[in-house]
Amino acid sequence: MLAVVDYDAGNLRSITHGLRLAGVDVVITSDPALVRSATAIVVPGVGAASDTMRNLEQRGLVPAILESIESGKPFLGVCMGMQVLLTYSEEGGLHNCLNVLPGVVSRLPEGVKVPHMGWNQVRHQGNHPLFTGIPSGANFYFVHSFYPNPSSTSDVLALTEHGITFPSVIGQGLVMGTQFHPEKSGNWGLRLLRNFVEICREAA
Amino acid sequence: MLTPRIIVCLDVARGKVIRGTKFSADREVGDPITLAAEYNHQGADELVFYDITASAEGRSLFIDVLERCAEQLFIPLTVGGGVRTPDEVKRLLRAGADKVSVNTQAVANPSLIHESAQRFGSQCIVLSMDILHQGDHYCVVTHGGRQRTDLDAVDWAKRGVELGAGEIVVNSIDADGTKEGYALSITRQIAEAVPVPVVASGGAGKPEDFYTILVEGRADAALAAGVFHYGELTVPQVKDYLKHRGLSVRLDIAGLQQGEEN
């Protein structure tokens, strides 16, 4: 069973159904015990980093998520659910995040439209199983003003351009995160979710 | 690089998609889920559901439509129509909307933009403005085009962004339904005046209209309804034309050989 973590972050329907289409049992939950008992975790999300961290902390979800990652269970973070993996975010002042992947979340530069909203190309850095069957350069749907910048280049799995070239997929081992929304990215997005489910099956 | 978005708008009343010209002459055209799935298949980059009843009963039907769409469609959904409070914004987001647009109520009560953006993030708050050519400028109109205000369109767009709107929809009442092209100069003025994406709306009739508003009008996205609903144009026709004119457009798996994207 895969847990989609619900911390009051808006639309969970699309990601839940996208994962179910991949043939996996999904529970939407804000209960730390259920998160601990899940075989894999997906943290979706929009909004601000500080609110996301506060919402996760208030529900006692931070230790549950960290224990699950430490025990080697697959993790997929989407947008804000990915950004909280880094050490801290510069959104609205400095805010500590989970520090699972060392690095910082910074604002996109001036001179381009922010939020970065729409479909943009995702260029693979290497052959990660998350990209099986998806061509490098396929378009995915983005909506964000801040981007992840991991300290280690080996944690960067794909790049996208909007004013600057920024990491749009990051990860280390079974911890993965996308800046775009696979659940809103048409068939390529559904394929990426299916690939994550496949990674979970192999890890089990 | 971002690809320009082609957005299809579905006006929903009592659970059905309706289309009118210049905000009048309602005419039923079909089931929203069926139409939404068809546009998804055609490669629409985003769908807008606009609740044109916004009565309590109409809103419940609308929420039901939205929930079912969000479970079946995997592209961005924006919703609007009669949104009055941040709690209503939340209800629509929970039902499956990715973005919520505010219009008349934001003019009456600009804090609706600010409070909603604070609670849910600017990225999901869209300021939709209906505008009318008047003398040497464009003024903002409300209540579906029936009521004029003193607000200048460019000023209101800038103010909306200051309050927290993450996207602006510029809907020309003059151009709406004419099929003679989008309102070019005002869309460009607004697109150059604000740092957030701008969506042009009203007046699409032929593929060139999309190209013109995206390139000369500097719009980030072009929205249309009627030309698509009546089959006068399809989304692939528009995208093929844009691609032919040198713009990069999004193609999905259904429409391309593997590796052909870009």
Image: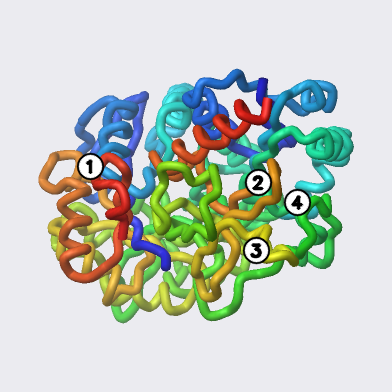
Q: Secondary structure at mark 2?
A: strand
Q: CA distance from mark 3 to mark 4?
A: 12 Å
- Residue at label 2? A176
- Kindly identify which chain the residue marked by label 1 belongs to: B
- Same-subunit check for callouts 4 and 1: no
Q: Secondary structure at mark 3?
A: strand
Question: In this rendering, which labeled residue sits more in front, label 3 or label 4?
Answer: 4
Question: In this rendering, which labeled residue sits more in front, label 4 or label 1?
Answer: 4
> Image point 18% across, 69% down: which residue?
B245
- Same-subunit check for callouts 1 and 3: no
Residue B108 visible, this angle: no
Which class describes the residues within 10 Å of circle 1: few (<14), some (14-19), or many (20+)? Answer: some
Q: Quadrant of the C terminus of chain A?
A: top right
Q: CA distance from mark 4 to mark 1?
A: 45 Å
Which class describes the residues within 10 Å of circle 2: few (<14), some (14-19), or many (20+)? Answer: many
Q: Is residue B201 above or below residue B46?
A: below
Place residue B219 in its image quadrant: bottom left
Q: Is residue B125 above or below residue A5?
A: below
Q: In terms of sequence position, does the residue under pointer 2 or pointer 3 come before the other?
A: 3
Judge from the rendering whether residue B143 lies leftward or rightward of residue A128; answer left or right. left
Q: Quadrant of the N terminus of chain A?
A: top right
Residue A80 place in picture, x, y as percent: 67, 50
- Residue at label 4? A84
Residue B159 visible, this angle: yes
**In the image shown, does B1 or B113 lie closer to the viewer?**
B1
Kindly check if marks 4 and 2 are in contact, taking CB atoms under 8 A apart as contact.
Answer: no
- Residue at label 1? B20
